[in-house]
Amino acid sequence: MEAQCLPQHRLPGISRLFADYLTHFDRVERFYRHNPFDPASLERAAAEIQYPQDRRSAMAEALRAANGPSPWIDLFEQPGTVAVVTGQQVGLFGGPAYTIYKALTAARLASRLRDSGQPAVAIFWLATEDHDYEEIRRAWTFDANRQPVSLEVGATPKQGQPAGTVVIEHSPVESLRAALAEFPFAAEVIAKVERAYQPGETLGRAFANLIRDLLAPFGLIFLDPLDPQVRDTASPFLALAFEKAASLLDALKTRSQELEAAGYHSQVLVDGRSHMFFHLADGVRRTLRLGDPDFADFSQRPHALSPNALLRPVMQDYLLPTVAYVGGPAEIAYLGQSHVLYEKLLGRMPVSIPRAGFTLLDSRGRKLLDRYRLSVPDVTVHRETLKEHISAALVPVVLEKHFASANDQIGRNVDTLIADLLRFDPSLAKAMKKSRAKILYQLDRMAKKTAREALRRDERAQAEAAYLGGLLYPHEHLQERFYSMLPFLAQHGLDLPARLYEHVHLDCPDHQVLTL
């Protein structure tokens, strides 16, 4: 496996906040409790954890009920054990590939902590409470030509129903089978999907079953916040947060203003209509706001509350002895806002660790990049722009040299002429400057026409542009944020997660381009 590092700022869509978090932490440190690149941060975060044994025992019991007997849960139950936590929405067929990358990063960090003498386990938080079904009902795979194929689950959720509880009526396994048909390990992948995604199963359990199966060697513990025992354990925290709701919202508004004043963005808009709680009852999650007539009634019913995106991680780290949370750019931005809630409700905060990021290349993709002298960022552009890049590489070298030489010579000759004209008649020199721009424009136009003609003549090149674009930048999204992990497993084998695990470098925030 060949690896190349790519700085995150070279990827499209990276926010200024995340870029500074990775490379100029001093600029954002006031929004976080710990520096993720300070080796002592994990030790300090672990020392701050005050986790009562009765809560630890209650959570261990809930985790055993959900995961079955496990030596990792036995370790979790021991005093002093810390948790490295990550999580994801319970998307169809495991959600985007970065779901796997998050889990591998958490497992790698937990292993490093154990090696250093700190007992630690990796826990995957299943975001089953989220009720945005539209975000998780579809998965994307690709076919043998590396063209995107959309897959959609059949289900009929109620308005506001937590996505994890939505029952699968029809799973698009046959469409997945057709898309993966030409890959060598498709049968093994389909078998795992069929076991997990049975009609009548919920999206939450199916997601957990598939990820657990794919990542069995890494000792992940799965936590479902909709589990009744977990909700009971969270009730005292939710009661406290509910009591402080007004002051917490004020703190969030101030934090949002601070972020924006520093030139960053607020991941969650906080204004006069903002809220931190949902009411979860009768299988539906509805918004609760401070001014609602029945708002005060929930002070006596904290078990019926569900946290919003900013309060959720704080509840998570009340429930767990979390030393570090592994997240992507959006989650780290959330935590920059949630920091004020951690300070007021827990008095501590875990270290926010950026997940590993990968772009996976097959041998053909690597050959095409080399042939056309392209890097991965060159491909993360509009498809027509990519075609222009490839067409430029297809122009015969002699023509390319002639165009470059002509551009240089004409420019120099005209510049000499302009200098002479300035001494003779400045008005003529001014006119010549305009003519110079037109001459060079026409020369550049002819060079581009030549490149387009080369592309038109070479149909193979158009197909190769489609292959590269489909593999690396499908629908103008990064590969890891768009495709499920399944087509990569079908192409490269079920041992791929183990191979990726070896390339999770906790001390390096760069994105990695791996040629498999």
Image (cartoon, grey):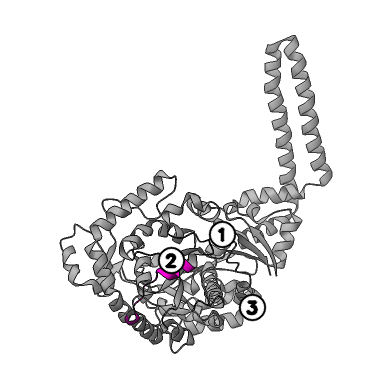
Q: Main secondary structure of the magenta part?
A: helix
Residue with the mark numbered 3: 493
Q: Is residue 441 above or below residue 513?
A: above
Q: Is residue 333 above or below residue 285?
A: above
Q: CA distance from mark 3 to mark 2?
A: 35 Å
Q: Residue at x 71, y 16 (%)?
A: 429
- Three-letter amino acid code of the residue under disc 1: Leu
Residue 123 quadrant: bottom left
Residue 406 quadrant: top right
Q: CA distance from mark 3 to mark 1?
A: 22 Å
Residue with the mark numbered 2: 350
Q: Secondary structure at mark 2?
A: loop
Say whether residue 177 is left or right of residue 376: left
Q: Residue furthest right?
A: 398
**Disc 2 crowd, CA 10 A, few/some/many (<14, 14-19, 20+):** many
**Disc 3 crowd, CA 10 A, few/some/many (<14, 14-19, 20+):** some
In front of the other: label 3 or label 2?
2
Say whether residue 261 is left or right of residue 173: left
- Three-letter amino acid code of the residue under disc 3: Gly
Q: Secondary structure at mark 3?
A: loop
N-terminal-most mark, 3 or 2: 2
| Viewer-proximal residue among 277 and 171 | 277
Q: Secondary structure at mark 1?
A: loop
Q: Which numbered marker is on residue 478?
A: 1
Q: Which residues are magenta?
A: 43-54
Say whether residue 413 is left or right of residue 168: right
Q: Residue furthest bottom?
A: 69
| Viewer-proximal residue among 59 and 181 | 59
